[in-house]
Amino acid sequence: MSADTFSGSKTRHGTNSGWSRHQTLGERPCDPCYAAKQEYDQRRRLAPERVLQSRAAAAAQMRAYRRLAHMHPAMYAALYAEEKQRLAETSGLRP
């Protein structure tokens, strides 16, 4: 499967994200995007325990992050400002 972007399109056709983009734009998904979505759904159905385990781990990570930020707000603010500055320096984006 290839992920192509047709001229004048920002959609990565032939991918699950391409399918999502079609949905967001209210379009009927193209055949490559539809096939990619079918393949994605089939892979998820074949490994439900892995999906559930991954979601549980991500939820635990987010809860720990929130607790840590709540316990040390000043340190969190300093680290956040530092990372925003680093992003601005490396990407040219404003902090």
Image (cartoon, rainbow, N blue to C red):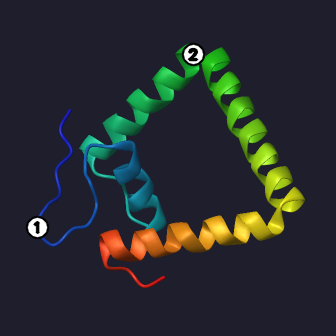
| Mark 1 crowd level (few <14, some 14–19, many ≥20, 10 Å Cα) | few
Residue at the right extreme, as displayed: 71
Residue 78: x, y in percent? 67, 71
Seen in the picture, residue 38 relative to 79 is either above or below; the reply is above
- CA neighbours of label 2 inside 10 A, class few (<14), some (14 to 19), many (20+): few
Query: Is residue 83 toward the left or the right of residue 94 in the image?
Result: right
Residue hosting label 1? 7
Q: Residue at x 47, y 75 (%)?
A: 85
Helix, strand or loop at disc 1?
loop
Tell me the residue that label 2 is attached to. 47
Residue nearest the observer in this picture, 69 or 15: 69
Tell me: residue 32, above or below residue 73.
Answer: above
Residue situated in front as seen by the camera: 44 or 72: 72
Question: Hey, which quadrant is residue 21 in on the image?
Answer: bottom left
Q: Quadrant of the N terminus?
A: top left
Contact, mark 1 vs mark 2 (Cβ under 8 Å): no
Mark 2, secondary structure of its residue: loop
Q: Position of residue 29 (x, y in %)?
A: 35, 53
Which residue lies at the image location 69% right of the left edge and 23% below the top edge? 53
Sequence order check, earlier mark of 1 and 2: 1
* Residue name at image x 44 percent, y 31 percent: 40
